[in-house]
Image (cartoon, helix red, strand yellow):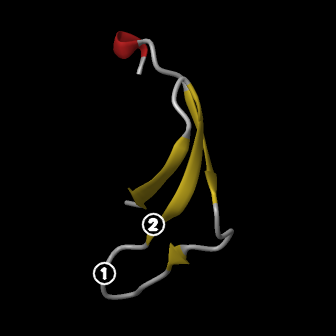
Amino acid sequence: MPSLSLSESLSAIVPDQLVRNTIIPTFWEGASTATGSRTGTCFVELSYP
């Protein structure tokens, strides 16, 4: 987020957290670690078109 001068790198704690589905869109969600301007653990959710 350049406007807040934040630079982060996220890494998944559990490697395969992709949910593949035929009825609902495929998405990835799970616990991650953040390093950069701030450090800690976080929960990330990404959806695929």
Task: Work out whether 2 lies above or below 44.
Answer: above
Residue marked by disc 1: 24
Of 19 and 23, the residue lying toward us: 19
Task: Work out whether 39 lies above or below 12.
Answer: above
Give the x, y percent position of residue 44.
Answer: 43, 56
Q: Amino acid at mark 2?
A: Glu
Quadrant in which the C terminus is drawn: bottom left
Q: Amino acid at mark 1?
A: Ile
Describe the element under mark 1 as helix, strand or loop: loop
Give the x, y percent position of residue 18.
Answer: 54, 73
Task: Work out whether 17 lies above or below 2.
Answer: below
Around disc 2, counting alpha carbons within 10 Å, would you say few (fewer than 14), some (14 to 19), or many (20 or more)? some
| Pointer 1 or 2: first along the chain | 1
x 39%, y 87%: residue: 22
Residue marked by disc 2: 29
Give the Cα separation between the discs numbered 1 and 2: 14 Å
x 56%, y 36%: residue: 39
Give the x, y percent position of residue 41.
Answer: 52, 51
